[in-house]
Each structure stands twice: as structure tokens, then as C-alpha cells.
Image: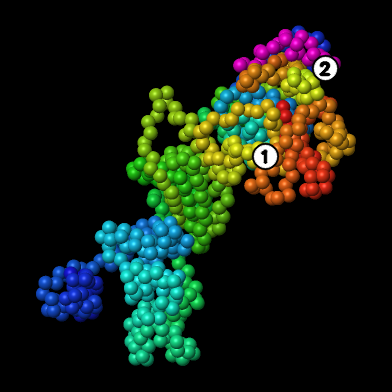
């Protein structure tokens, strides 16, 4: 089911709307890879977020950290993946929540096509985005409208100190999508001077992981 | 003025006031005799049932002075004031406060404070005014009637020449034990003496206040699933609360089994509510935990804690406000997953990362803090130790092993030194040097070294991964 096409020197592709009110899924490579988390944090709309985690995710990959994230969170520390799905469905019906995030470890039986389809339909009916963050899982059948695979990328040298890690860069691959053609991009989080702007800069990525046309698709998906 | 009750030969004096007592009226005497003694006597029939109700109401009101209280006979209250007196400015001040407030309510009260229930009973009725008993030998000069004994036993003791509690305490127990071997425990002078002196425990059984609102379904035939009755009960309870402008914070569903068991399910709400649909949803998935046995024949839904809740007007756009919706969501999640699972992190003033996050009530209030670029997005709790393969004297290790993966550091920034909080930590706690590092594949981590080599607080410093950056 997964289409993995990376055309070299591709024309600037349309970047899907990251704040679309639907179910999107991010596969993270490892527990130490914060790229998926950063991409998600930059794509969330303003307002309260329900953040549900299962027990294995908490133990293996930690918990969201408020000082770094700086968002109004309602955290649900649950034990089973089925509980996470229930809490997400419940929160999608609440008008006070602006987005719902669920983290599930591995490929539990509860996370099947039916469960993801329920989430997608509820998110679309309620008009608020729902994100599923998955680790150590396979790209099995899922009704998520957008399926991303996000990995870290060596950052640009820091402005002040070339030996220090610079602004984050992520290699973002949309490997299955119902809303726009799939593609792969190199995404940077463009911060304003005061660090408040959440704007994502997309640049098309060639097969050989080289950056082409750095400013081509800039800012389309950021939505401000 | 006297209160009269029916006796075997006409009405007798049930209780009397001070004026009647000074006129020579005695309790238990016949009303006609007493009227001959004092022609101006007013006689009102007594109503013991209403007296008991009023006393029970007074008992709950008396919990302003202590967490546990119970009625004591027909005319007494006992309050457990352990550890309470300092709130009222001492034990004497507590007693004065009690007497003043009861007088303001139109009641004449005799109060006493003692280490045991029995001693307090005796001192309140036979002691001085507002006595505070510090030493239980204070009881010795009191008459034996202060031991809560019946008239027959008191008569017997008087015939034996035992008038004071001190007399009773000073004679060998063996004689008394033989004499009163057949007496029931509540009428045995030795038992009562032991209770007053604290040798025998006498716990206070404080009843719970009755729930404010109750809806019940009594069933002719036992049922196995209360789910069909729940919507009706919730609607009835909500209507009762709406009539008095109240909303509930805690609900208890009790099912009474035919064979003498009771099952309780409690749900709580974050804000007072009486919306039947919302209350009904809180029981979703909870009824499966009930063991029906041979069936239930009584289902009771009680609102255990209620708060005033005025009828709110829906906004012009037809939507209720966000805080209300959020409290509803929190109620549903807490009812299903427990209160510990639902957390709202709030910033706390601390430099130590694991202490800079606190828990708060999940309410929409203060805005979140601005994100700090030098803090990670995720944090490991507890931090995970790494094994250093290639150490560098200054700065982070060049190569380390985390969960059997070798990670080579290509760039780093730091250190940021965070000292232990000496006012909270144990004395041997080591300081931390935090580094932001990036490995060859671009993963950005928050690494720290605990301690310095040669700081005299343990061996070589250890390294930990604490967080993950974007």
C-alpha cells in the first residue's frame, strides 16, 4: 500500500495543508528521534491540545516537556493502546479542544483499520485535526488521510557557534495521502527573531538527499 | 414549664426548665402532683421523635468544631476534637466558643473537654463550668452517677457506700468484678470506669450526613443490569437539583443485591452540573464492573456533594462556553481512566528540568509559557544512563552507547550548569552539566553529566540522556 516515490529533480510539489481537519499519522524512526515530535508541534493549531499516550510510549520515548513545547496541554497518561483511541475519540467531540494527539507504540491489535477510520471520520465531522504519533510500528493498513514519515536531518551550522547544533532540519516524507500527491521534502522550522512564529519552510528533496530548489515551495504549508 | 410524656398512671414530667426546677418540680413525677405543688405550671406534651431529629441536625452542625461527631443519648453530643483546639485559640477558648454559639442558637449547653468520651460525659454533667480535664484523676471527686450507670446500679453502689468515682477506683477490682459479674457491659461500673479512664477503647462512630438528593428505584423483581433504570434515575435526580438550583460534584450509584450485598460506583465532576445526558455518560463502561449475583432489587442514585448552580443562559450563538465543554471532557476521561491519568502540566519555578513541571486542575486558566529553544520537546523520566566509550576531557563524550546503539557526537553546545537545590535535595547530590548534542544522523539530544571528577561526591561522573530536541 505504501507508495514510496522520490523523483530526482522533481517540480515543486503542492504541500498538503498541515492543519486540515482530518487524521494524520507520523511514523518516527526511533525514541531518540525528535523530528516527528518537532514537525507535529509546529503543525498544531493554537489552543488546548489533548495529548494521550500509552504506557510503553511513556516508558520508551518519554513524555512531552512543557518548557520546550510551551503549549496548553491536557495530558492523558493511559495504559493500553485501546484506552488511547477511546480518549482521542472522546476528545474529538469536545469543542474546547483545538487538536488531539495520540501516541501508540508498536502495532497493537486495537489500532486496526476500523479504529483509524473512526478517528478520521470523527476528526472530519468535528472539524479539528487529529494526529497519531507512532513508533516501532509497521506501515500497516490505516485510514489516516495523510501518512508521514519524519526523520532527523543534520542541521545547518549554528549562526553563533559553528560547532553547535543549529536550527532543526527534518526529512519529511508523505508516503500515502488522500489529499495531495505524495512527496518528500526537507523541512525547516523558520523562527522569527522572538521565536514565536510557527512557520514551516518546505524544500523539495531529491533522491540522493541533496537539497534542490531551496526556496521553491517555501511557506505553502505553514499557514502562518 | 414542663414537658409531659405518657406514663403508666397518667402523664409524667418528661423534662423541665430551671424555673420549674426551682419551684420543686422533679423529673419523672406525675404531672397532677406537680401541678398541686406549683399551680402556675405550664404543661406541653413532649415530642421525642422531633427532639431526636433536631439533635441529629445539631450534630452535623457541631462538626464545625471537629471532623467527627455523634449523638450521645437523648440529650448529648460528643465531638472528637483531637488536634483541633489550636484552631480556636486553645482548649478553654474552644469550650467558650461552643457555649457562646449554642447560646446564640437558643440552647443552654454544658460543655467539657476530656481525653475520653466517658470522662467528658461525667464532667459535662457533674463537673464545674467549662472544665478541661488534663489528668484523669480529676474525675475522682465526681459522684458515681458520672459513670453513665442506670438507676438500679447507682442504688446498689450507694448501698455499698461507694459515692465517689475515687472510692470505686481505690477498692480492689476483684470484689467489684465478683459483685457485678452478671451486669451487662453498659451498666457495669468497672467497664464504665475503664472507659472513662481510657483503659478500654470507646471509638466514636460518626455517621455520614445523608445525601442532599436521592433518586431510588425499588423493583418488584430482581434485575441483573441497572442500565435500563439509570436514565430515569438520572433524570429524576437532575430535576430535583434543578428545583433547588444545585449542581452535583459527586454521584454515587448503589445497587442492593437480593442476597445482602451492596455495590457502589462513584463518579465525580470537575464543575457542578445537573445535565442528565452528561451525568449519564459518566457511567459509560462502569456498570460492567458490578457483580449482580442473584440480581438487584433496589437501585439508588445519590448526589453526595452539591454546589449552587444557577440556571445559565445559552449564548446568543447557541453555544455554551469552552470552559464548560472542557470540564465535561475532563469528567468523562476521569470517570473512565481515573483522576491520576488526566494531567494538566503547569510551569513550576525550578531550574531542575524534572521539577519545572507541576500538575494542576485541568481548567482553562493561565496561558502557557513561551517555548524555550534551549529546552527539549520530550523528556525521559527518569533520565537514561549511557555508557561512554570515548570520553573527552571538556565537553560531551565523542562516542557513547544508549540502549545498545552507538551514537557518535558530531556537534555540541554547552555546558549549561544546573546546581542541585540544596534546600530540597539530600546533601550528597551532584551538580549537572547539560549539553545539547547532535549525532551523525541529525538526532538532537539533551545529555548531562552528573557531577565533576574529583568533587568528592562519589566516583567518576555518570552520563545521562534526559531529553530529545526537535
Tell me the residue that label 2 is attached to.
A209
Image spot of residue B11 (x, y percent):
20, 75
In the image shown, does B110 or B459 lie closer to the viewer?
B459
Which residue is depicted at the point 79% across and 48% down?
A: B456
When the figure is inspected, residue B242 is found, relative to residue A198, above or below; the finding is: below
For the magenta stretch, what is the residue range? A203-224
| Cα–Cα gap, marks 1 and 2 | 39 Å
Where is residue B27 shown, x and y percent of the image? Answer: 24, 77
- In this figure, what is the number of numbered marks? 2
Q: Position of residue B12 (x, y in %)?
A: 21, 76
* Crowd around label 2: few <14 · some 14–19 · many ≥20 (10 Å): some
Q: Chain of mark 2?
A: A
Q: Regarding mark 1 in the picture, which secondary structure is present there?
A: loop
| Residue at x-position 49% and y-position 73% | B201
Q: Chain of mark 1?
A: B
Question: Which image quarter is the C terminus of chain B in?
Answer: top right
Query: Do marks 1 and 2 share a subunit?
Result: no
Residue annotated with mark 1: B352
Amino acid at each position: 500500500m505504501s507508495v514510496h516515490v522520490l523523483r530526482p529533480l522533481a517540480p515543486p510539489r503542492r504541500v498538503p495543508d498541515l492543519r486540515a481537519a482530518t487524521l494524520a499519522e507520523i511514523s518516527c524512526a526511533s525514541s531518540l528521534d525528535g523530528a516527528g515530535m518537532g514537525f507535529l508541534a509546529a503543525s498544531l493549531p493554537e489552543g488546548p491540545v489533548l495529548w494521550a499516550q500509552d504506557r510503553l510510549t511513556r516508558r520508551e520515548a518519554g513524555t512531552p516537556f512543557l518548557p520546550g513545547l510551551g503549549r496548553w496541554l491536557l495530558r492523558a497518561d493511559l495504559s493500553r493502546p485501546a484506552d488511547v483511541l477511546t480518549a482521542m475519540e472522546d476528545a474529538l467531540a469536545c469543542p474546547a479542544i483545538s487538536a488531539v494527539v495520540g501516541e501508540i507504540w508498536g502495532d497493537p491489535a486495537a489500532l486496526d483499520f476500523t479504529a483509524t477510520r473512526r478517528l478520521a471520520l470523527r476528526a472530519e465531522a468535528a472539524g479539528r485535526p487529529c494526529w497519531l504519533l507512532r513508533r516501532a510500528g509497521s506501515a500497516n493498513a490505516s485510514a489516516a488521510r495523510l501518512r508521514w514519515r519524519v526523520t532527523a536531518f543534520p542541521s545547518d551550522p549554528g549562526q553563533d557557534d559553528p560547532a553547535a547544533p543549529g536550527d532543526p532540519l527534518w526529512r519529511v516524507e508523505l508516503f500515502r495521502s488522500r489529499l495531495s500527491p505524495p512527496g518528500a521534502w526537507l523541512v525547516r522550522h523558520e523562527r522569527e527573531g522572538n521565536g514565536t512564529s510557527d512557520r514551516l519552510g518546505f524544500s523539495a528533496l531529491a533522491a540522493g538527499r541533496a537539497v534542490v530548489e531551496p526556496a521553491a515551495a517555501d511557506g505553502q504549508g505553514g499557514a502562518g | 414549664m414542663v414537658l409531659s410524656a405518657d406514663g403508666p398512671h397518667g402523664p409524667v414530667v418528661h423534662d423541665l426548665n430551671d424555673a420549674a426546677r426551682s419551684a420543686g418540680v422533679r423529673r419523672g413525677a406525675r404531672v397532677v402532683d406537680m401541678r398541686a405543688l406549683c399551680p402556675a405550671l405550664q404543661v406541653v406534651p413532649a415530642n421525642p421523635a422531633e427532639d431526636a431529629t433536631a439533635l441529629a441536625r445539631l450534630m452535623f452542625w457541631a462538626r464545625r468544631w471537629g471532623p467527627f461527631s455523634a449523638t450521645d443519648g437523648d440529650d448529648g453530643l460528643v465531638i472528637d476534637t483531637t488536634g483541633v483546639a489550636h484552631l480556636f485559640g486553645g482548649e478553654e477558648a474552644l469550650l467558650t466558643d461552643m457555649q457562646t454559639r449554642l447560646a446564640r442558637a437558643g440552647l443552654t449547653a454544658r460543655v467539657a473537654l476530656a481525653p475520653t468520651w466517658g470522662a467528658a460525659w461525667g464532667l459535662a454533667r457533674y463537673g464545674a463550668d467549662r472544665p478541661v480535664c488534663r489528668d484523669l484523676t480529676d474525675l475522682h471527686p465526681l459522684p458515681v452517677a458520672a459513670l453513665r450507670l442506670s438507676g438500679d446500679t447507682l442504688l446498689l453502689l450507694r448501698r455499698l457506700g461507694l459515692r465517689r468515682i475515687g472510692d470505686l477506683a481505690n477498692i480492689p477490682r476483684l470484689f467489684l468484678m465478683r459483685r457485678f459479674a452478671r451486669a451487662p457491659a453498659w451498666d457495669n461500673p468497672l467497664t464504665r470506669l475503664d472507659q472513662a479512664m481510657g483503659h478500654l477503647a470507646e471509638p466514636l462512630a460518626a455517621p455520614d450526613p445523608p445525601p442532599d438528593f436521592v433518586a431510588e428505584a425499588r423493583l418488584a423483581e430482581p434485575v441483573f443490569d441497572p442500565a435500563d433504570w439509570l436514565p430515569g434515575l438520572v433524570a429524576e435526580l437532575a430535576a430535583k437539583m434543578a428545583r433547588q438550583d444545585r449542581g452535583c460534584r459527586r454521584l454515587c450509584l448503589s445497587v442492593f443485591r437480593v442476597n445482602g450485598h451492596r455495590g457502589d460506583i462513584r463518579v465525580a465532576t470537575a464543575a457542578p452540573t445537573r445535565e442528565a445526558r452528561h451525568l449519564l455518560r459518566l457511567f459509560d463502561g462502569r456498570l460492567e464492573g458490578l457483580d449482580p449475583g442473584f440480581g438487584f432489587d433496589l437501585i439508588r442514585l445519590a448526589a453526595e456533594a452539591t454546589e449552587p448552580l444557577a440556571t445559565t443562559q445559552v449564548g446568543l450563538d447557541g453555544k455554551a462556553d469552552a470552559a464548560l465543554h472542557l470540564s465535561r471532557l475532563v469528567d468523562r476521561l476521569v470517570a473512565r481512566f481515573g483522576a491520576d491519568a488526566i494531567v494538566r502540566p503547569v510551569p513550576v519555578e525550578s531550574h531542575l528540568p524534572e521539577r519545572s513541571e507541576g500538575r494542576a486542575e485541568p481548567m482553562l486558566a493561565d496561558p502557557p509559557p513561551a517555548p524555550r529553544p534551549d529546552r527539549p520537546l520530550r523528556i525521559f523520566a527518569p533520565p537514561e544512563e549511557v555508557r561512554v566509550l570515548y570520553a573527552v576531557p571538556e565537553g560531551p563524550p565523542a562516542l557513547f552507547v544508549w540502549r545498545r546503539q552507538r551514537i557518535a557526537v558530531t556537534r555540541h553546545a554547552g555546558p549549561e550548569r544546573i546546581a542541585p537545590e540544596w534546600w530540597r535535595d539530600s546533601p550528597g547530590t551532584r551538580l549537572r552539566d547539560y549539553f545539547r548534542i547532535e549525532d551523525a544522523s541529525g538526532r538532537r539530544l539533551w545529555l548531562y553529566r552528573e557531577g565533576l571528577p574529583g568533587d568528592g561526591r562519589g566516583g567518576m561522573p555518570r552520563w545521562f540522556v534526559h531529553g530529545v530536541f526537535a
